[in-house]
Amino acid sequence: MAYTVTRPCTLLPSGMQFGKCLQARDMAYCPYSRFPVGAAVLTADGTIITGCNVENASYGLTVCAERTAVQRAVAEGHRHFRAIAVTCDIKDRFVGPCGACRQVLMEFASDWTVYLTKPDGSYKETSLSELLPLAFTPGHLTQH
Ligand SMILES: [Zn+2]
């Protein structure tokens, strides 16, 4: 179940380092939206891999921070994940991954812990299954 921690934090539960998420956000390439986003995935072996949004003049080619992080992690040999943290510049509310990113996360598991964080490190902890209920998963392709 989702819960919210309103005090600033540098270390999120399960060893997720919030600072890495902020560093990734600061690397965002977002000249069109001016909406920088950072993400950090925590792999099963404790590695943290980050991503930022990378926009393109052909807007549809833009890739979100969450997908950048997952794709980097997979390219580095990771297939099992425990958590993802996402942050942006919005200070007064928590912002979740877009629908496309939720589906990409679901490819690897339904039990991700998801930290929606504000720039000060306060966060809402939720789960992927809560963010994407009744999801289409790889298991559906093997069950027909
Ligand atoms: Zn997205």
Image (tube, rainbow, N blue to C red):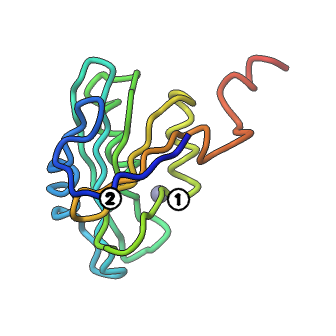
> Which is nearer the N-term, disc 1 or disc 2?
2
Q: What distance separates the C-alpha of mark 1 from that of mark 2? A: 23 Å
Residue 94: % across, % down: 42, 64
> What's the amino acid at mark 1?
Cys
Which of the 4 image quadrants contains residue 91?
Answer: bottom left
Query: What residue appears at the point 55 percent right and 32 percent down from the top-left corner?
Result: 107
Label count reads 2
Residue designated by label 2? 6
**Quadrant in which the C terminus appears:** top right
Nearer-the-camera pick, 44 or 28: 44
Left-right relation of 129 to 74 = right
- Identify which residue, 100 or 126, lies in the foreground: 126
Residue at mark 1? 98
What number is the disc on residue 38?
A: none
Give the residue displayed 53% in from the left and 27% down from the top.
109
Residue at 43% x, 45% y is 125
Location of the N terminus (image quadrant): top right
Dot 2: within a 10 Å radius of its alpha carbon, few (fewer than 14), some, or many (20 or more) residues?
Answer: few
Residue 122 rendering spot, x and y as whole percentages? 29, 57
Q: For the residues carrying marks 1 and 2, which lies nearer the camera in this image?
A: 2
Residue type highlighted by circle 2: Thr
Residues at discs 1 and 2 in contact (Cβ within 8 Å): no
Query: Where residue 69 appears, x then y in whole percent?
Result: 32, 44
* Ligand 1 within 8 Å, label 1 CB: yes
Secondary structure at numbered mark 1: loop
| Label 1 packing within 10 angstroms: few (<14), some (14-19), many (20+) | few
Q: Nearer the viewer, residue 21 or 69?
A: 21
Q: Is residue 59 left or right of residue 87?
A: right
